[in-house]
Image (spheres, rainbow, N blue to C red):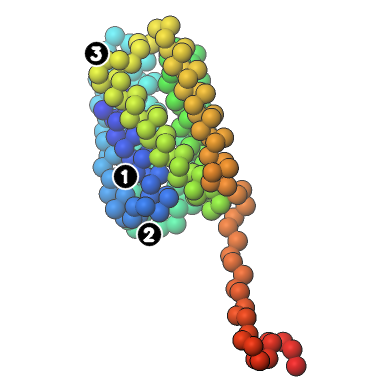
Amino acid sequence: MGATGLLYVGAVLFLNGVMILGRVDAKAAAIFNLFVGGLQVITPLFLIFTAGSTPDPFATVLGSAGIFLFGFTYLYVGITLLGGFDSTGVGWFSLFVAGAAAWFSFANFKILDDKTFGVIWIYWAYLWFLFFLLLGLKLDGLTAYTGWVTAIEGIVTGFVPAMLLLTGYWPPVGNWSQNTIAITLGAVGVGVALLLIPLTRPRLGPARPRQPVEPVPAAGEPVPGRT
């Protein structure tokens, strides 16, 4: 994934996480989703069309193909939010993205020898599976947990790698330091995912409507239901 595109993936994930937490208006976030979604569709098309001029066309095409998953997700989210449509479609599409992300993680580990992005794709597979649970299955008890995971992943898997890539501090593929970064990313991901559980108290069942509370009668008034 291009460093510039990755930077804006981090931005839109952070914004969507804040939106899920109820801090940003949905339609305001929808506009930025459309911007980034369009970028994430145009960018891989350009990379694939020009892959023949790169040193490794196969790696370029393979690395670019996964970007469409995000581009279509953000376009889908943006249109759904602006149109006020039900989010079930986005949720079930997210299940497909989660499965594809797991495969791209394997491809980065075994084919491209890119361990750091192999771990980052696991991050994305987990996040998109949360989107499936929240939007597809309507498990509203996961709202706060998903919002925090989304916002944090925007920083950890988007902003930080993009800035390191743009400034030349990201280790090249196959470099020995990739193992250290991959292990660190994995440990941070597991730690944050577990730490957020008690902090957000996620519930796997759908949200239950609150039972109405009957008013307490004043002194001397008859108690309802009693004669």
Residue 199 falls in image quadrant: top right
Q: Is residue 218 above or below residue 162?
A: below
Is residue 174 something that shows in the picture?
Answer: no
**Label whose residue precedes the other's in the sequence (1 or 2):** 1
Residue type at mark 2: give it: Gly
Task: Report the residue marked by disc 1.
Answer: 33
Q: Nearer the viewer, residue 10 or 83?
A: 10
User: Callout 3: helix, strand or loop?
Assistant: helix
Residue type at mark 1: give it: Asn
Tell me, for residue 84, which label it has, or none.
Answer: 2
**Outermost front residue:** 219
The residue located at (31%, 37%) in the rendering is: 11
Q: CA distance from mark 1 to mark 2?
A: 15 Å
Task: Report the residue marked by disc 3.
Answer: 53
User: Which of labels 3 and 2 is toward the front?
Assistant: 2
User: Which of labels 3 and 1 is toward the front?
Assistant: 1
Q: Nearer the viewer, residue 84 or 56?
A: 84
The residue located at (42%, 21%) in the rendering is: 117
Specify whether 76 is left or right of 128: left
Badge 3 crowding class, 10 Å Cα cut-off, few under 14, some 14 to 19, many 20 or more, is few
Q: Please state the horizontal and vertical placement of residue 125, each as a whole percent of the image.
A: 49, 32
Residue type at mark 3: give it: Ser
Q: CA distance from mark 3 to mark 2?
A: 43 Å
Q: Quadrant of the N terminus?
A: top left
Q: Please state the horizontal and vertical placement of residue 218, each as a whole percent of the image.
A: 61, 86
Q: Quadrant of the C terminus?
A: bottom right
The residue located at (39%, 20%) in the rendering is: 62
**Label whose residue precedes the other's in the sequence (3 or 1):** 1
